[in-house]
Amino acid sequence: MSRLVGFKEIEVSKRLKRAMQQRGAGENLVKNLAELIKNSDDSYDELQRSNVETNGTIEVGYWQTVKNKRRSINAFFIRDYGVGMSREEAESAFGEKSYGEDTSADRRNGAIGVGGKDAFYGMEGVQIISIKKGVPILIEVVTNDDGVLASKISDNHSFVTTAMSIINNQIRKHCKTLKLDQDGTFVRFRLPESRPGIRFETLRNNLRLYYTLRNITNGANHTGLRLIDVDTGETFLLKFDETESEILQKPESFQIAHVNKKGVQEHYQVDVLIQRAKDELDKDKEVGENFIIETDQGGILDNYMFGYQNDPAAAKIFGKVIIHNWKSFFRDDPRVLHENREGLLWSHSFNKEIETRVIQFLRPILDTERRKLGPNPETDKMIDKKMKSTLAFLNKLMKEDEFEDEKDEKAPPEVLEFSYGRMKIVPGKTKTLKLLINPLVIPKLTEISTVVTEGVKAGISVEPIGRVKTPDQYNYPPEVPYIKFQITANEEGTDSHLKAYYRNYEPEVTISVVPEDELYPMDGFAFVPSSIRMVRGKEKKLRMVIDTHLFKPGTIIELESEDERIILPFSKITVSQPNMGKYLTEEFLYISCEKSRIKSRIFAKTKTVTNDERVAVCKVRVIEKEDSKVFFKDVKLDPSGDPRKRARFNDGFVYIHVLHPVLELYFGSKQEHIAHNPTKDAVALLADTVLNIALRQWAKKRIEDGIVDVLDLSRKDEEIDLEKDRLERKYGKQIHQTLNAKYHSDKI
């Protein structure tokens, strides 16, 4: 503890104060006016909360001048007929110690925005007349020689009424005069000579559309805004017309937890409304239609599109987010707003939680909207820019390559995952699908959004769909929790996509509706898939598809493991009645193995109705631990890579050796033609390099997993090259375009 006494507070320098006040509303005249208009709205709010009826009128008067042969507006008044200010309230709002203080009490716009004082910075002739219970107050504000705001407050009756007379003489011809029996506040100011005025159309349109005034101009706050030409008396009602739209979603209200300064956890309710307009919307931050973030009192905090403002799929999407009891939260943690109190600070944990929740609601909606856009190259380009990884598309193809290999239900997924990557169903049949949940990541009763992205054009029906919840009880270990879906096939020849959304995770399953004969196995029965990987010490589910044309229900199938270390649960199974279609049926069994690094086979033997012997084979590879959920993780430019090779693959990453002579020629010595100013040639070469090494790794994996048979192991490298060529012919163009788009910009 210091023994010194007489500590003095360190004052803020005039230089810093000048900078803070200068950047408040800046040079944005509409923002200046909006702050003063919100003050007037607050004066009515105080009366409304006391159940006092008001007309809610807020007037913005203006004077026009001609300067350099250009007619513009350079002087204004803002007036309300609300509660007015007493001398004490004026001192609190405009006195010597008022700057930066929250003097708003519980008014709806209080503590939101840069504040009325900042709106006067650099202005001339600033006068405020406020009348409360017949007592007038005069406040004058100037920007002094030090460049900071200074004020003077007077309640001298003679002095103030003289100022009122001067103002009345200037406005009486077309505007109501100031009277002591009419409470309210009148503010006037003019622009300095150094600032250009504003055109009438610009003023009218921007005030009508400005987002912080939206609940005033649309009437939600029971106040109204009028623009008055003081010289002519012409009046214009500034009304925001609600966009013609439909409600897409109104999710259940959710609570966000916050630990206050006393260490007590509190919860704040948040409501969300998502709408779709008939036509495309302007997404401008200040005057466009995005998601209005507001308090339950009607004060507007932000106009935010959650990162989708440039996404064509979101062009018609807008809505509202309402935060309840927000004023209490702000007073406990002012960091929720930007330093200048203009807009929410989205890096704050409370706001980030709102953003995460809203994005979870938006993603399935935007996926559906995106499909409606059709094959528009510009749209595709915009979407592909949002890829989490350059190789996300290739990983998706690899997951589909697993086809009907059901995921291990005894090992939790990374976060959440469907039990199949792809399914085939016969028309009229219903199949069960599970969304597996990691209970260590996702809490009980958590809401998950789901959607069939084809909408009404989907060839399937799914129950449940929309917002679903995780189980109310987890029994893990040993059981991995899941949400069960019933998938019914309706229209043959269709591919549909069921997606789930939780935070930034979007698992997806492709469901194909196919004729039954497409599923008939070769030789009448087969393991599907015919090659599997299993983890040592964990059971693996095998699936066998059987054609009852050839093998009647009741037929015995004998099972045998080539390696006795791979344990079968029984040595025989019986063919059941058709359960997949008219003639097809499926049987399941679980195998296990306690040793790793084993490659072996499971045999199934039986006889047809004509007594022909048939054998089905399943290749089994036992591994030590689970493979990574993502095979290709990303692409990295590597200046230290071997310049004799273009690229290498290691642990999921494709490393591009940028000093390879050919790559350096096109990329530039500092990779400037890729990293900063991409050129078409450089991007095309990068895409080709990534494609070449990625497809070879995929081909190698397919062969090692036994998906592709190699009869002569001495020709393994040649077989890998052949398989790579086959994959490139099938997928090369799609993958090339996807990789290309990752680096596209308007400059290309």
Image: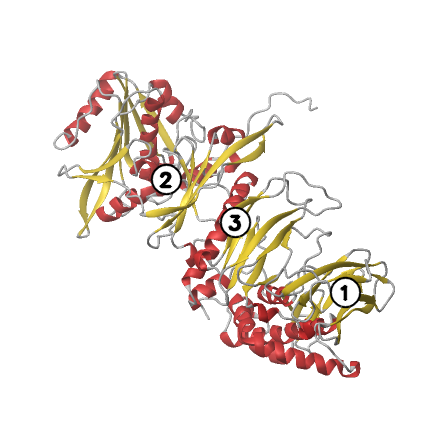
Choose between 552 and 349: the one closer to the eye. Answer: 552
Q: Rate crowding at label 2 as few (under 14), some (14 to 19) or many (20 or more) other CA atoms within 10 Å.
A: many
Q: Toward which corner of the image does residue 596 lie, by quadrant?
A: bottom right
Look at 67% across and 38% down and name the residue there: 473
**Among all residues in the image, which is located at the extreme right?**
564
The type of residue carrying mark 3 is Ile
**Residue 648 in view here:** no
Q: Toward which corner of the image does residue 561 lie, by quadrant?
A: bottom right
Look at 25% across and 40% down and name the residue there: 238
The type of residue carrying mark 2 is Thr
Q: Earlier in the sequence, mark 1 or mark 3?
A: 3
Q: Toward which corner of the image does residue 506 lie, by quadrant?
A: bottom right
Which mark lies nearer to you, 1 or 3? 1
User: Residue 212, which numbered label?
Assistant: 2
Q: Rate crowding at label 3 as few (under 14), some (14 to 19) or many (20 or more) other CA atoms within 10 Å.
A: some
Q: Position of residue 30 (x, y in %)?
A: 31, 43
User: Residue 465, which numbered label?
Assistant: 3
Position of the N terminus by quadrant: top right
Q: Earlier in the sequence, mark 2 or mark 1?
A: 2
Residue 331 position (above or below residue 515): above
Query: Disc 2 and disc 1: Cα gap in Å?
Result: 75 Å
**Mark 1 and mark 3 residues within 8 Å of each other at the beta carbon:** no
Query: Disc 2 and disc 3: Cα gap in Å?
Result: 36 Å
Local secondary structure at mark 3:
loop
Q: Position of residue 579 (x, y in %)?
A: 63, 59
Which mark lies nearer to you, 2 or 1? 1
The type of residue carrying mark 1 is Ile
In this picture, residue 64 sits left or right of residue 115: left
Local secondary structure at mark 2:
helix
Look at 45% across and 28% down and name the residue there: 101
**Residue 461 in view here:** yes
The residue identified by callout 1 is 556
